[in-house]
Image: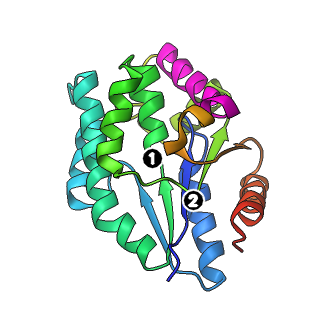
Amino acid sequence: MARGPLIVFEGAEGVGKSTQLRRVASWLESGGRVVHALREPGGTPLGDEIRRLLLDPASDITPRAEALLFVASRAQLVETLVRPALAAGHVVLLDRFFLSTYAYQGAGRGLPEAEVRQANAVATGGLVPDITLLMTLPVREGLARAERRGARDRMERNADEFHHRVSAAFAAFAAPAWQAAHPECGPIVTVDASGPEAEVFARITNVISARLGLS
């Protein structure tokens, strides 16, 4: 049986990853495919507890500890859910993966890229996404969207300068030269996340159909 595709949804705060992932999951399921919609951090009992700690505004977590917690959640998710689903030929949709670690803990927190990449390699065991949909939106608009969802979590409460560093990092990831230097990331395609949900969804499904032949 052929390995199923791994599709990752990435981007800064408020770009609409979770909303679009749910829509894509329903679209693929309506076509008869088995879909696993997962998120990072989380997805497993261990990952959900790590998520609670990482997003709790009361948590006092150092940058290196933060990075390692994200990586620990990823390692558990990949080993127990992602790889078995892919081996069964199913589609796996991931709300964030290691590009977020490169952006948030690398560029945002200032951790050395080499250390972040090494930790990620341990967590993923060389698993490469078939495509990463990098959703883009101006920082201010994304944070405003996040604000409308309710109380901001620990990551969302970082200063604007932090979020601008994260957004700049995601923009850099879209460059062909950066991708060529980071083969562990697989192909990355930017998707304009502005406008009505239906329009963004159409952009995403067009990319998935064209790149992976899914419908």
Residue 206, by quadrant, is bottom right
Taking depth in this image into account, of 101 and 200 the one nearest to the observer is: 101
Indicate the amino acid at tag 1: Phe
Residue 108 in sight in this render: yes
Asked if residue 112 is among those painted magenta in the image, a careful observer would answer no
Indicate the amino acid at tag 2: Leu
Considering only vertical position in the picture, is 6 above or below 166? below
Asked if residue 176 is among those painted magenta in the image, a careful observer would answer yes
Tag 1 residue:
97
Secondary structure at numbered mark 2: helix
Q: Position of residue 191 (x, y in %)?
A: 72, 45
Mark 1 nearby-residue class (10 Å; few <14, some 14–19, many ≥20): many
Considering only vertical position in the picture, is 76 above or below 137? below
Considering only vertical position in the picture, is 101 above or below 140? below
Tag 2 residue:
21
Taking depth in this image into account, of 44 and 98 the one nearest to the observer is: 98
Query: Which portion, as a residue range, is magenta?
Result: 160-178
Which tag is nearer the camera, tag 1 or tag 2?
Answer: 1
Taking depth in this image into account, of 39 and 80 the one nearest to the observer is: 80
Q: What residue is drawn where x is 62% and y is 26%?
A: 172
